Amino acid sequence: MSFLRKKDQILAALGNIRAMERLHVDTYTEGKIKNITGKKIAESKQGQLWISFQNLNGFLFMNCTILSRKSLKTSRGSKLLLLTKEYEIELDSDEKIIEPDFSNVSNTWITKMSFVLSNKEKKIIEERSFEEIGYHFKKESLNFKMKK
């Protein structure tokens, strides 16, 4: 393994871009991963979901951060599905284009997005009166269980 690393170091010194990318340590994105604001409300083997609330000009926003091993990049927006015992709540993302950041240190993608909420939906989320959360993008989905 050290032979390949030495080879990359030599190629990077000669100006090879791919070798430079393999050697690059992304401390900026790793710092964002370690200092996520908000509360972790759900997790699964597929990742972790963190939220925080923000009130802007009379609109209530829920800012979500998802840590996963998979890129959640999309240009069509995403949906968050809250499953309660009686019904399900579907929230559409505020922005259509969602760009995740990758950290090669921990091999993790961090994706940030926001959703517009009503006060009723905020109360359900704060009281954690849901069992599952589904994050749907493109034709894929991530499922999370509520963290107690």
Image (cartoon, grey):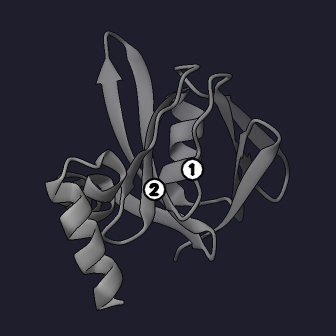
Categorize mark 2 by other alpha carbons within 10 Å: few (<14), some (14-19), many (20+). many
Residue 36 left/right relative to 45 = left
Residue 59's label in the rendered image is: none
Q: Residue 82: x and y, percent?
A: 70, 49
Seen at 63% across and 77% down, the residue is 45
Q: Secondary structure at mark 2?
A: strand
Label 1, secondary structure: give it: loop
Q: How many tags in the picture?
A: 2
107 and 62: which one is in front? 107
Whether the residues at callouts 1 and 2 have beta carbons within 8 Å, the answer is yes
Q: Which residue is mark 1?
A: 71
Q: Is residue 32 visible?
A: yes
Image height check: is 29 above or below 108? above
Q: Amino acid at mark 2?
A: Trp
Of mark 1 and mark 2, the one earlier in the sequence is: 1
Using the rendered view, name the quadrant where residue 72 is placed: top right
Task: Say which quadrant the N terminus sits in.
Answer: bottom left
Quarter where residue 111 is shown: top left
Q: Which residue is mark 2?
A: 109
Seen from the viewer's position, the closer of residues 27 and 97 is 27
Q: Residue at x 32, y 31 (%)?
A: 54
Q: Is residue 24 left or right of residue 107?
A: left
Q: Position of residue 18 (x, y in %)?
A: 36, 51
Q: Residue furthest top?
A: 57
Q: Position of residue 53 (x, y in %)?
A: 36, 38
